[in-house]
Image: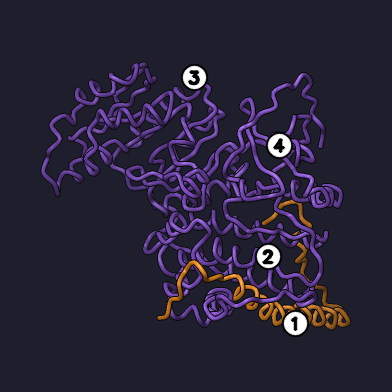
Chain colours: A orange, B purple
Amino acid sequence: MYFAPLPYLDPGSGSFLIQLLLAALLGLGVAVRASWTKIKGWFGIKPKNDNEDDDDEAK
Amino acid sequence: MTTKQNNGQTERSGIQLTASFRDPNGFLFSRGGALYRQVNRKYAREYARLMESGLYAKLVKAGLLIPHEEVNQAPAESETALKVIQPERVPFISYPYEWSFSQLKDAALATLSIQRRALKLDMSLKDASAYNIQFVRGKATLIDTLSFEMYNEGQPWMAYRQFCQHFLAPLALMALKDVRLSQLLRVYIDGVPLDLASELLPWRTRFSFGLATHIHLHAKAQLHYAGEEVKPRRGTMGRQAMIGLIDSLEAAIRKLEWKPGGTEWGNYYDITNYSDAAFEHKKELIGAWTERLKPAMIWDLGGNTGVFSRVAGKSGAHVVSWDIDPTAVEINYRQVKDEKNENLLPLLLDLTNPSPALGWANRERDSFGERGPADITLALAVIHHLAISNNVPLPRLADFFAETGKWLIIEFVPKSDSQVKKLLASREDIFPNYTREGFETAFRKRFKFHEAAEVRESERVMYLMERL
């Protein structure tokens, strides 16, 4: 394995780029889920209450 | 929130605490035995948003953020100051390398839950340090009120890397490799380096989406782009993408479970060598003695799953229940949650090598000793491990316990006890002074004896002593 000199290596750039990549992908998932919930809604299927963040107690 | 009036406040100095020195937005300082946080003018907009958007109230109500009061104290550095707040005092500061698996997991989930609530009100956590989380009333709570920044859609999560290093990597290692790897956090103060985590994790974790991406791929990207300058472009990460990222991290964390090999949770510590009568007698003595002393803080050293910690806790004290066994600490913490116990904190500690002072100039994280002394130390069925297994002479044990607490409730376990016989079975008996008389002589040099009681149906003796 190759190790570059440690003091000049900033893991920040890689973290930043991978986050953008993953987030784009995962955001798509959120969008798909949201539309799916909407479609199910037309057929009268209500989503489970997943709004835990508005509960008084966090899980 | 109310504003406390402290009229006649003339003292202007304050000791700035080193754990918060990195933050330009404010810092902690102590004055007259009380703890304050100076909020700098630089942080005025963010502080106003936190308080006025309702985020503060929501988080405090959910037990996710430490409550504070704005106080009329002189700031410690007036040139930069906006105001001074007094956060509720955390009974005991603990660190991630002292937490059991579920404690770290709950701290991780609390962090994500806070970020989710913050996003709804256009704020975002700018750090995701495990050290910003403390256990308050039994719950993982953010103690850094200045952790929030404005959220502008398009910006990535500043704390993503830190979250992976402080939470996801150690939890994955604990769950999927070995629970003792939590101790890597003691070496790496900013969390487990992802390339190290990636190397240590089993190969199969590359097939789990969460770990494959947030750890393995993340580590690869860090290595690949190291040294390259990345220009952040605005509008590159929408709100939905941000929520997708948080969802994914949460799913990855929730999926991680740890079950200690071959043991059942329920009867883990049922195996003792003494009778029910002896057990009940011990409980009675501890109950009566702690009740009498009205302590505020008790340390139970070698507390196992916390049976006697709970008895001691009936005195109304906060009890920290320390044990070397990650399984015992885990069981204890699960029980704390089940019974909604607000005064008991189980923590992991090797008494023969307690948590050292760590971080910049060794002043960021306090050592075990620096966080004491307690009002009472409990040392039940622990002295034979220290004196015989670890070869510490009795006078040195007396010195040690004189530092951990003002009062000591200690159980002497003689050589004739079957547990001690077990310890001596594989070694030469080089402990001629390890007798009741030897013990009393050593401890009388540092303590005044108040009570001594032979435990019924056993050869053990319980003592209540006060340090000289």
Res B157 quadrant in image: bottom right
Of circles 3 and 2, which is in front? 2
**Is label 4 in a helix, a strand or a loop?**
loop
**Is label 1 in a helix, a strand or a loop?**
helix
Question: Label 3 is found on which chain of the structure?
Answer: B
Question: Label 4 is found on which chain of the structure?
Answer: B
Check disc 3 and report the residue beneath it.
B292
Res B221 quadrant in image: bottom right
Label 4, label 1: how many angstroms apart (C-alpha)? 47 Å
Check disc 4 and report the residue beneath it.
B77
Q: Give the amino acid type for the residue marked by disc 1 in the picture.
A: Leu
Place of residue A50 in the rendered image (x, y in percent of width and height, measured from the top left): 75, 66
Q: Give the amino acid type for the residue marked by disc 4 in the picture.
A: Glu
Of circles 2 and 4, which is in front? 4
Of circles 4 and 1, which is in front? 4
Label 3, label 2: how many angstroms apart (C-alpha)? 51 Å
Question: Label 1 is found on which chain of the structure?
Answer: A
Q: Give the amino acid type for the residue marked by disc 3 in the picture.
A: Arg
Res B410 quadrant in image: top left
Check disc 1 and report the residue beneath it.
A28
Q: Are labels 4 and 1 assigned to the same chain? A: no
Place of residue B227 in the rendered image (x, y in percent of width and height, measured from the top left): 56, 75
Q: Are labels 2 and 4 assigned to the same chain? A: yes
Place of residue B165 in the rendered image (x, y in percent of width and height, measured from the top left): 54, 64
Q: Give the amino acid type for the residue marked by disc 2 in the picture.
A: Met
Circles 4 and 1 in contact, beta carbons < 8 Å: no
Circles 2 and 4 in contact, beta carbons < 8 Å: no
Residue plotted at (58% across, 49% down): B338
Q: Which mark is residue B171?
A: none
Check disc 2 and report the residue beneath it.
B158
Of circles 3 and 1, which is in front? 1
